[in-house]
Amino acid sequence: MNLTKLFETQAALDEHIMQEHPELRGQNNLDWKLLALQVELGECANEWRGFKKWSKNQEKRNYVKCELCEGHGELFSFSAESYVPCCDCKGSGKDYSKNPLLEEYVDCLHFILSIGLEDYTYFQFGDNFTGPVRLELTNDFGVIKYHNITTQFLYLFNQIGYLTDCILEREMATADEIFEQYKQTWQMFIGLGEMLGFTWEQVEEAYYAKNKVNHVRQENGY
């Protein structure tokens, strides 16, 4: 995990957003970023589907149906006058170029990084930074995992709530307390990713890919 590169990449996107939305510059943007993180985490849980006990389909959405064969895995060949395996998905019916669950997970990562970049928090992500004295967040801070994914989601929601309390009530929380809550958010978030079956290499690759998409969206007036 290269935290410095991740934070620097996110900082470039945040600056791009500020350029497109100058009304955000110079104000406290932590409240809506914290809410956005909660919303994206809910969307991640929705793609996981494991809590939908009322449904017969509780499989996580780590693929989408192939658009060519519409998930059937076969196409009718007029030359052979029979059905043949779909050439796009090799007969699986699944589009492995898309992973909705991973995409939602890295959307959460965007906001966790962005929260850490705010001047109202006290985190150092590299040697070349300006602003208030910050505490250092290192690559080896470990993970926190609970006994199942449902519980992991629940406690991560709670943890973001604790972080929100500390940040929005800064007069009552020290920099060390804010830092500890932010660190635990990272630990539980990484633990969730591992429980969902993602390697950190997959997460970083998906993050950088989505980051590029987000830059394009800003340029296109998304």
Image (cartoon, rainbow, N blue to C red):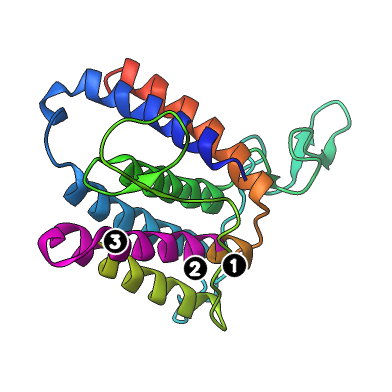
> How many labels, in total?
3
Mark 3 or 2: in front is: 3
Measured Cα–Cα span from mark 3 to mark 2: 32 Å
**Viewer-nearest residue: 182 or 51:** 182
**Residue 201: within the magenta?**
no
**Viewer-nearest residue: 119 or 217:** 119
- What amino acid type is highlighted by mark number 2? Arg
**Viewer-nearest residue: 77 or 65:** 65
Residue at the (15%, 27%) spot, across then down:
25
Measured Cα–Cα span from mark 3 to mark 1: 36 Å
- The region drawn magenta spans 164-190
Q: Is residue 128 visible?
A: yes
Q: Which residue is mark 1?
A: 59
Q: Residues within 10 Å of mark 2 (few under 14, many from 20)?
A: some
The residue tagged with tag 1: helix, strand or loop?
loop
Q: Which residue is mark 2?
A: 49
Say which label, 3 or 1, has the lower sequence index.
1
